[in-house]
Image (cartoon, rainbow, N blue to C red):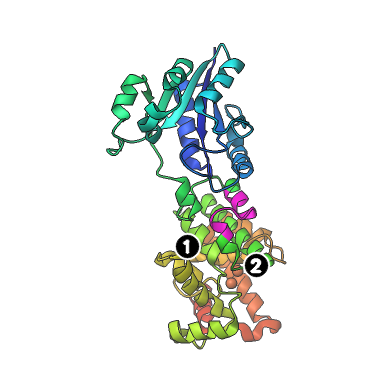
């Protein structure tokens, strides 16, 4: 007799919080965890199509494939709505001799008495639940007692799918994040509109590179979320008409009116990140503002975004060595990238491209 933990939900998208809960349940009970994404969740309409939610789940559980599985039975169900009891009956037929567990959140415990056939559900599966005591959930105590539910202990994550959909969190596996960008899901649908095809490829690659640098340099704390957002939005100003860029420079960044026009987009990018995406985090905004020129005394995040922009692998020059050094040690990587950039700017072809911010940056870091 094995334990089978059924974990249903819309997974719109799956995130590290879901994986953490599933791992807790697995550690507690053993056996295997089966993720069952719903096609039409009863309580809400999902944002991404079923096909995408399923693929993201499959990507997310890959590292745990010896004890995590995805089952698309609800997505293929012809019944609409397909209730939990319908799913459990199928599981019982498939695994007549195994112990079934149903893993749900405390918000669902609160509504459990309203589910279809709750008594039959608990005859087929033991309900285990996660969540912190939310005082607005007034039926939890009663339902836990009545339906003999068991609380899953363990640290919970604050991550929510809503925060991910609205770009307030990227607490999810890197390959799932890549999938979201590649398929224009959630926030990326909006961001994509600011970029041409080629530029979008570049910013996505920069954003994923910045995340990788943040992950690899674990000895220094680099905020993974900030690295992503700043790199993803860094070129927002690039395709803004030059007359509009000029107007923004004159009205909002007058102190930088001596900076050559090729670098205006970094200031315009900061402006758009604030105006259109409501970014108010100074670290993120500064990283966008100095990604092109650099400056003296840069923050760690500014260095990450500066480097990710120049070493991301879709660039038309060989970035591998610079990328390796950045992943190994961002401070060393930054000096390497800066030096390469200085050589590039000082080459005959780019003689006119130097500006006071870059000069100050080179003087500060490259003695
Ligand atoms: Fe740029
Ligand atoms: Fe760029």
Q: Nearer the viewer, residue 145 or 322?
A: 145
Q: Quadrant of residue 190?
A: bottom right
**Above or below, comparing residue 50 to residue 292 in the picture:** above
> Quick check: 19 left or right of 337?
left
Q: Is mark 1 within 8 Å of ligand 2?
A: no
Q: CA distance from mark 1 to mark 2?
A: 22 Å
Q: Is residue 184 magenta?
A: yes
* Residues under numbered marks 1 and 2 in contact, where contact means CB atoms less than 8 Å apart: no
Residue 12: percent from left, percent from top: 53, 44
- Residue 301, labelled with which disc? 1
| Local SS, label 1 | helix
Q: Nearer the viewer, residue 231 or 88?
A: 88
| Local SS, label 2 | helix
Residue at the spot 47% in from the left edge and 59% down from the top edge? 226
Q: Would you call the spot at circle 2 few (<14 residues within 10 Å), some (14-19), or many (20 or more)?
A: some
Ligand 1: image quarter: bottom right
The answer, for residue 160, to whether it is visible in the render is yes
Residue at the spot 29% in from the left edge and 39% down from the top edge? 136
Check the picture and name the quadrant holding the N terminus. Answer: top right
Q: Which residue is mark 2?
A: 199
Q: Quadrant of residue 129?
A: top left
- Residue 54, labelled with which disc? none
Q: Nearer the viewer, residue 123 or 160?
A: 123
Residue 216: percent from left, percent from top: 54, 50
Q: Is mark 2 within 8 Å of ligand 2?
A: yes
Q: Would you call the spot at circle 1 few (<14 residues within 10 Å), some (14-19), or many (20 or more)?
A: many
Task: Give the residues drawn in magenta, as a range.
Answer: 177-189
Q: Main secondary structure of the magenta part?
A: helix
The answer, for residue 298, to whether it is visible in the render is no
**Above or below, comparing residue 251 to residue 306 in the picture:** below
Q: Is residue 217 magenta?
A: no
């Amino acid at each position: 007799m094995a334990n089978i933990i059924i974990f249903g939900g819309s997974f719109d998208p799956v995130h590290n919080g879901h994986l953490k809960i599933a791992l807790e349940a697995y550690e507690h009970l053993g056996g295997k965890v089966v993720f069952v994404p719903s096609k039409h969740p009863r309580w809400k309409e999902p944002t991404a199509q079923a096909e995408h939610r399923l693929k993201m789940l499959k990507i997310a559980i890959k590292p745990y494939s010896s004890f995590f599985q995805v089952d698309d039975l609800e997505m293929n169900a012809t019944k609409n709505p397909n209730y939990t009891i319908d799913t459990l009956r199928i599981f019982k037929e498939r695994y007549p001799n195994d112990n079934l567990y149903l893993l749900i959140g405390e918000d669902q415990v609160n509504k459990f008495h309203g589910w279809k056939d709750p008594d039959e559900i608990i005859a087929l599966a033991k309900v285990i639940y996660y969540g912190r005591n939310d005082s607005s959930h007034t039926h939890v105590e009663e339902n836990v007692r009545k339906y003999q539910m068991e609380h899953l202990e363990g640290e919970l994550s604050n991550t929510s799918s809503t925060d991910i959909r609205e770009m307030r969190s990227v607490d999810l596996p890197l390959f799932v994040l890549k999938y979201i960008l590649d398929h224009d899901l959630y926030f990326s649908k909006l961001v994509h509109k600011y970029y041409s095809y080629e530029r979008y490829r570049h910013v996505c690659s920069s954003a994923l590179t910045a995340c990788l640098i943040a992950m690899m340099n674990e000895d220094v704390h680099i905020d993974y979320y900030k690295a992503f957002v700043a790199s993803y939005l860094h070129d927002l100003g690039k395709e803004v008409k030059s007359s509009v860029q000029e107007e923004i420079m004159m009205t909002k960044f007058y102190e930088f009116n001596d900076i050559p026009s090729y670098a205006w987009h970094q200031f315009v990018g900061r402006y758009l990140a604030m105006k259109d995406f409501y970014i108010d985090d100074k670290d993120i905004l500064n990283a966008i503002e100095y990604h092109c020129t650099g400056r003296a005394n840069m923050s760690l995040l500014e260095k990450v975004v500066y480097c990710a922009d120049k070493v991301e692998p879709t660039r038309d020059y060989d970035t591998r060595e610079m990328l390796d050094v950045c992943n190994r040690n961002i401070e060393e990587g930054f000096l390497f990238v800066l030096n390469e950039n200085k050589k590039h700017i000082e080459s005959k072809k780019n003689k006119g491209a130097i500006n006071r911010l870059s000069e100050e940056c080179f003087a500060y870091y490259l003695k």
